[in-house]
Image (spheres, rainbow, N blue to C red):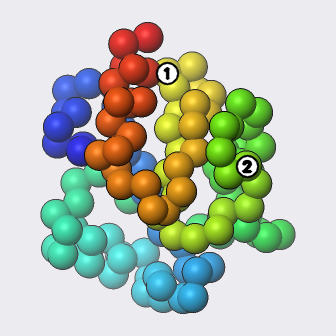
Amino acid sequence: MDKELAGSDFKIIAFPCNQFLGQEPWDNGKIKDFVKTKFGVEFLMMDKINVNGTNTHEVYKFLRSREGIRDNPGKIGWNFGKFLVGKDGQVVQRYGPRVAPNDIMPDIQAELKK
C-alpha cells in the first residue's frame, strides 16, 4: 500500500506493541530489522509503545479519544488495528485488526481528494 501511494500525501506509521500476548518481545532495532527483512517494510516504524493502560503513549491517547470514530471506540483490543487520520490531523476512522489494509483503500483515496 505504501508503494501504491508513493508520491501522495499518504504516509503509514507503525507502532509496535508488546501488550498482546507478547507478540513483539524484541528490542526496537530487532523489530525494525525483522519487518524489513521478512515483509519488505519501507514505511516509518516507530519505537515500541503501550497502546492501553496507565502507560499509554500520547499518540494513542489522542487517537483513541477523538470523536467521530464510527466503530470500535476506546481500548485497543489486539495488534494490527489501524487509524486513518485526515490532512487536518483528525481521526477519520478506526479499523480493527481483521480489516485488510487494501480494504481501506477507498477511504484513503477519498481523504486524499479532500
Q: Is residue 110 above or below residue 50?
A: above
Task: Give the image location of residue 16, x and y in percent.
Answer: 48, 68
C-alpha span from label 2 to label 1? 21 Å
In this rendered view, identify the residue nearer to me: 90 or 77: 77
Residue at image point 58% right, 80% down: 20
Q: Is residue 47 above or below residue 100?
A: below
Residue at image point 58% right, 45% down: 94
Q: Is residue 59 above or below residue 48?
A: above
According to the picture, the residue beneath numbered tag 1 turns out to be: 87
How many numbered marks, from 0 up? Answer: 2
Quarter that holds the N terminus: top left
Residue at image point 39% right, 40% down: 104
User: N-terminal of the two: label 2 or label 1?
Assistant: 2
Residue 7 is left or right of residue 11, and the answer is left
Residue 94 is left or right of residue 64, and the answer is left
Q: Amino acid at mark 1?
A: Lys
Task: Give the image location of residue 23, x and y in percent.
Answer: 48, 85
According to the picture, the residue beneath numbered tag 2 turns out to be: 73
Q: Amino acid at mark 2?
A: Pro
Q: Residues within 10 Å of mark 1 (few under 14, many from 20)?
A: few
Q: Quadrant of residue 49?
A: bottom right
Task: Give the image location of residue 87, x and y in percent.
Answer: 49, 21
Task: Give the image location of residue 113, x and y in percent.
Answer: 36, 13
Residue 19 is left or right of residue 97, and the answer is right
Residue 9 is left or right of residue 92, and the answer is left
Furthest residue toward right: 54
Q: Is residue 43 above or below residue 4?
A: below
